[in-house]
Amino acid sequence: MWEDILRAALESGLWAALFCVLLAYLLRDSRVREQKYRDTIDSLMRGLGVLDEVRGYASETLRLLRGKYKRGLRGSLEAENAAGAECEGADV
């Protein structure tokens, strides 16, 4: 196929032949570049999968910590209320 195109370009002149050679080179080069881009995107997607896992673990840990904090806060508020009630009943 390229031989026929090159032969027709040579009949049309040197500039047409140079254009065809340059076009063939660019098409081949862009194919290689496109494959590199796809490989890069695939590796980034794998990295995002790992980040999603980490985000899930972090969310779960945060949820557990918030639950413990709220339970601890409720316990300390109840203790403060009990201490305040004792103070109200005492003569100071």
Image (cartoon, rainbow, N blue to C red):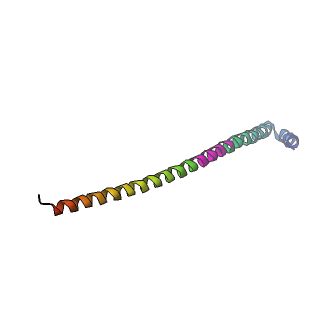
Please state the horizontal and vertical placement of residue 12, each as a whole percent of the image. Answer: 83, 41
Residue placed furthest toward the left: 92
Residue placed furthest toward the front: 90
Judging depth in this view, the residue of 63 and 32 nearest the camera is 63
Count how many numbered circles sit on residues in the image: 0
Q: Is residue 87 left or right of residue 74?
A: left
Please state the horizontal and vertical placement of residue 80, each as a whole percent of the image. Answer: 26, 57
Quadrant of res 10: top right
What residue span does the magenta drawing correspond to? 39-51
In the picture, the quarter occupied by the C terminus is bottom left
Judging depth in this view, the residue of 6 and 11 nearest the camera is 6
Q: Is residue 11 magenta?
A: no
Q: Is residue 69 left or right of residue 86?
A: right
Judging depth in this view, the residue of 49 and 60 nearest the camera is 60
Seen at 63% across and 47% down, the residue is 45
Seen at 34% across and 56% down, the residue is 73
Quadrant of res 1: top right
Q: Is residue 90 above or below residue 13?
A: below
Q: Is residue 71 left or right of residue 18?
A: left
Please state the horizontal and vertical placement of residue 43, each as a whole percent of the image. Answer: 65, 43
Seen at 42% across and 54% down, the residue is 68
Seen at 53% across and 50% down, the residue is 57
Report the predominant secondary structure element of the magenta stretch.
Answer: helix
Please state the horizontal and vertical placement of residue 62, each as a whole percent of the image. Answer: 46, 52
Judging depth in this view, the residue of 47 and 10 nearest the camera is 47
Q: Is residue 47 magenta?
A: yes
